[in-house]
Amino acid sequence: MKRVLILDWSEEWRFYITRALEELNCEAFLAMEQFRATPSFIKGILIIKNLYKNPIEHLNKIIQYMEENNIDSIFTCEDELVELAAKVAESKNLITCPSKVINKCMNKFEVRRELECKDVKMPFYKKIQSINDLLSISKLIDYPIILKPIDGNFSNGAIKVNSPKAIEAAWEYAYKATFDSPSNSREIIMEEYLSDEDRVISCEAVIIERKVYIVGLTEERQRKHIDISKNETFIYDMMLVPAQLDKDIQCSIEEQTKKIVSNLGLDNCLVHVEYKIKDGVPKFLEINPRIAGGLIPELFKIALGIDLAKIAIKLAMRQHIEETELKKSIDRVACAKFIVSEHSGTIENISYDNNLNSLDLDCLKMVLKKGDTFRLGELFGIGYIICSSNLTADAIEKTKKVLDGIKIEIS
């Protein structure tokens, strides 16, 4: 029986990993920063304090734990740990995407610099290494622009800058987020602001022995938020699978994804590639060499019948993946709506309308509870709602009806 070590895990946001492990014929172990309640089938837990701080420093400890427990595969879905997992796999001659490729993918600047000469369409960008560097060009560029950490994720630290007057405050906001970014590089990327359209399109693909399988597209809708310092930032609002796109744009994204994967040398992994549409043309934003995060795997399973979590773990364990597993067996639309408050604070109470149980929904989950602290823009929110339908508008409307029946009091 295969044994797999999972680098970190969360029942609240990674429940699909738990389900996939239960369904697969394997024995699972966990490596985490601190102990928390885990599924009963977990065979062992390795606690590594400061796992996310310079993860590569923990390479030998993880290798030793795997050898002591006869663990023959490793998997993670965390940006900060994906290079560590690849290095462990390489040291034990396991199947993996090369760690040097993963390292490059995590740096938005290096990826764009490599792809811009390969006819990959992308926004104008520039690496900014200091506030003085930024101030020196602040009056020479066209506004608005976007500032964000060079390897940030989930829009963490991304901020829209509308004029030179806002540059210094925007720099402070983006720079602060570098302390939580995967590499702690303290570097910022400045890029062209593409449009006011509130959606990012991501392409989910699986690469097995150099062959690229496009499994579907996700529509991630964001909304702008003005914080107390008047910074214009971005908050995840909802996700849709499949993305609602014209066929020509969809085909363009799929072909561009294959080109990007080939040029970067990605192999034996899942990828999550993000685009934004401008004037009908998809512009490449970034690539993540891992399974899609958030609720995307659950939406794929509900809408398309594709189990991204199971595929990713099977690939890590060198188990055969049938091509039918990579193709849709269901034809529905799944929508995830994030439950957020307009401001941060302590949750005083959460109440529900009496008719909530009669509504048609796939899932309602509160991640935070009474007494917890909610920080606007941190992770995805207080909880989430998932609804599905044969029609896009109906799936969205269902989530809104459920949300209308939830009242959250924050002080």
Image: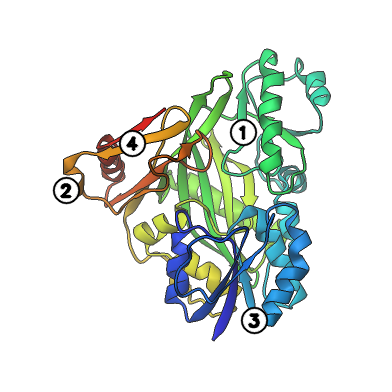
Nearer to us of marks 1 and 4 is 4
Nearer to us of marks 3 and 1 is 3
Disc 3 residue crowd, few under 14, some 14–19, many 20+, Cα 10 Å: few
Disc 4 residue crowd, few under 14, some 14–19, many 20+, Cα 10 Å: few
Tell me the element at label 2. helix
Mark 1 vs mark 4, CA separation in Å: 30 Å
Q: Which residue is mark 2?
A: 358
Say whether disc 2 or disc 3 marks the residue closer to the N-terminus.
3
Mark 3 vs mark 1, CA separation in Å: 41 Å
Tell me the element at label 4. strand
Which amino acid, by three-letter code, is at mark 3?
Asn
Question: Residue 75: image x %, image y %?
Answer: 60, 68
> In percent of the image, x 51 and y 76: which residue is there?
321
Which amino acid, by three-letter code, is at mark 2?
Ser
Q: Which residue is mark 1?
A: 158
Mark 2 vs mark 4, CA separation in Å: 22 Å
Nearer to us of marks 2 and 4 is 4
Tell me the element at label 3. loop
